Each structure stands twice: as C-alpha cells, then as structure tokens.
Amino acid sequence: MFDIKKIQQMQQQMQEEIGKVQEEMGRQTIEASSGGGAVTVAMNGNQEVQSIKIQPDAVDPDDLEMLEDLVMAAVNAAVEKSRAMQQGAMGKVAGGMLPPGMNLPFM
C-alpha cells in the first residue's frame, strides 16, 4: 500500500530541487557561434539570450541575409547547448525516478 504522505513529501522535495536547479541554470552561461566566430551568442541555462556579438567583417550591407542566417544558426546552437545543460541538471533531480524515455514536462 502506498503512503500518500510520503509521496507528497517526495513531490514537494522534487519541486524544491527543480526550483534550485532552475535558479542555477539562470546563472550558468553557454556560448555558441557560427560563421567561424563571426556571430557569437551567449545564453543562460533557461534559454534567455544574454548577448549577441557580431564581428564587423560579418556585416555586408549587400548581403544581410547571410548575417541573418549566421545569427539564427548561432542562436539555435546556443538553445541546443542550453537545453542539453538543463536536461542533464534536471535528470539529476529526477534521480532515476522516471521510467526510461519519459521526460519531465519542462525539458
């Protein structure tokens, strides 16, 4: 028979741990670049862009589409790195409590 109080305590503890991890993710920064470093994006673990740096030689007024593509590629790469970092941290919180292949809703 399940002890509902114990389950509720475990749920509360997990929620507290998730909150701590999310705070920590907000303090972690990753960088991703495209175009050989022409565009660099810094993002925190909560997928919030912190900065975008563009090298002057990447700016060609006659080819703005290339610059747009470089920015998009760098942002997408930063999002992927941030997600991977967050999934790793949240996976530690779950501590193997979830069945294989089942992700937490915020991942």
Image (cartoon, rainbow, N blue to C red):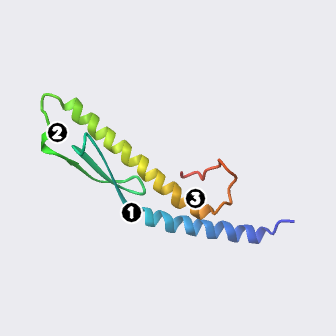
* Amino acid type shown at disc 2: Ala
1 or 2: tag closer to the N-terminus: 1
Amino acid type at image mark 3 = Gly
Residue 9's place in the image compared with 83, above or below, is below
The residue labelled by disc 2 is: 58
**Element marked by disc 3:** helix
The quadrant holding residue 57 is top left
Instruction: Left or right? Give the position of 7 relative to 1.
Output: left
Q: Is residue 39 above or below residue 30?
A: above
Residue 28: assigned label: 1
Q: Would you say 27 lies left or right of 18 here? A: left
**CB contact under 8 Å: marks 1 and 2:** no
Say few, some or many: other residues with alpha carbon within 10 Å of mark 2 (under 14 / 14 to 19 / 20 or more).
Answer: some
Residue sitting nearer the eye, 71 or 23: 71
Task: Provide residue 58's location: percent of width, then percent of height.
Answer: 17, 39
Between the residue at mark 1 and the residue at mark 2, the CA separation in whole angstroms equals 28 Å
In the displayed structure, 86 sits above or below 38; it is below
Q: Which labelled disc corresponds to residue 92?
A: none
Whether pointer 2 and pointer 3 mark residues with C-beta atoms closer than 8 Å, the reply is no
Taking the view exactly as shown, the residue that stands out farthest to the right is 1
Q: Residues within 10 Å of mark 3 (few under 14, many from 20)?
A: some
Q: On residue 91, which mark appears?
A: 3
How far across and down, in percent of the image, does residue 107 sit? Answer: 54, 51
Q: Earlier in the sequence, mark 2 or mark 3?
A: 2
Give the secondary structure at mark 1. Answer: loop
Residue 71 location in percent, x, y?
27, 40
Whole-Å distance between the Cαs marked 1 and 3?
17 Å
